Amino acid sequence: MALDSQLKAYAEQLAARGDPPRHTVSPQVARAMRAADLAADLAAGLVRPEPVSHVEDRTIDAPASPIALRIYTPRGVGPFAIVVYFHGGGWVLGNLASHDSHCRSIANGAGCVVVAVDYRLAPEHTFPAAPEDCYAATRWASEHVAELNGDAARLVVAGDSAGGNLATVVALMARERGGPPLAFQLLIYPITDARMLTDSYVTNADAPMLTRADMAWFRAHYLRDDDDVTNPLVSPLLAADLDGLPPALVVTAEFDTLRDEGELYAMRLQAAGVPTMVRHYDGLAHGFFGYDLIVERAKQAKTEIITALHDALASVPTASSVTTAPTAPDA
């Protein structure tokens, strides 16, 4: 299938802004470019964050350093499922602002409390800083479930791209470290194999939004040395076994360098007996989850993904918990 025409037009619009290729600049410049692109898209109405019932920014203590969180609460009466969300950006880019729209959509569409995690970024903080922060934030959410008006039986890890990598890595860490128990993992075009050897790295080497050169740049900043490439907490596809991991939804796109490793990871989960759904989207490219106001096909895909998350969580028996009064919109 050809690249979606609306997505192609948006990619051409981004190129017309004249930014140099991401992999040719420093992380600091790349972050500034990304912030400027987000500001331009917000001003143009290409990104429009949904109102949710309540949004709170807070900072939690963690073993290495404090971690900033943004907590989104939907309308309704809890206890709600809790989705701990890790943003994408190749472990180098991204923050609470860059994925604010993603988290609002998930909170509303799936009826979940979303806890977004501002984990430490490379190259200032190389592996394993990001997974340790994400694991600490997930433990915090589990330990503060009552405060969040959450349901302890429906704790989810989720993320896109590098955030998808961190979500399934946290699932592995939780299994090895004795918890917290997880009900589900939502992996949106995840990085699962840092060796960069799959066919989609060849066929989509120059794909819009994420190129092979970009991925090499991200990897070089994130890893401490070559040995980290095959560490399962970097490349979960290489884990010795995936038994006992929570059910998963794995999302891939046709024009994405990460397509094949996402699908291979889903196959390994299924082979390990982990209930796993796969959603593959022809015609779309990396990052499409954030293009719902630009690309009709991306809007449909985003709705399908969030609906699948909602339905998966609806089938999980809830834990006993005290409910609270409905919340009123304020953000």
Image (tube, rainbow, N blue to C red):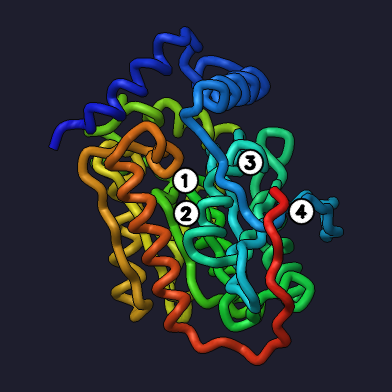
The residue lying furthest to the left in this view is: 1
Instruction: Kindly identify which residue carries mark 4.
Output: 56
> Which of marks 2 and 4 precedes in the sequence?
4
Please identify, in this view, whether the residue under mark 4 or under mark 2 is nearer the observer.
4
> Which of marks 1 and 2 precedes in the sequence?
1
> Which of marks 2 and 3 precedes in the sequence?
3
Which quadrant of the figure has residue 329? bottom right
**Secondary structure beneath label 4:** strand
* Kind of residue at badge 4: Glu
Q: Tell me how many marks there are.
A: 4
Tell me which residue sits at (62%, 60%) in the image: 114
Tell me which residue sits at (66%, 50%) in the image: 130
Depicted 256 relative to depicted 128: above or below: above
Which quadrant of the figure has residue 213? top left
Between the C-alphas of marks 4 and 3, the distance is 34 Å
55 displayed left or right of 109: right
Looking at the image, do the residues carrying marks 3 and 2 touch, with CB atoms under 8 Å apart? no
Whether residue 134 is visible to the viewer of this picture, yes or no, is no
120 displayed left or right of 193: right
Instruction: Kindly identify which residue carries mark 1.
Output: 161
Instruction: Kindly identify which residue carries mark 3.
Output: 224
* Kind of residue at badge 2: Ser
> Which of marks 4 and 1 precedes in the sequence?
4
* Of residues 240 and 283, the one drawn nearer to the viewer in this rendering: 283
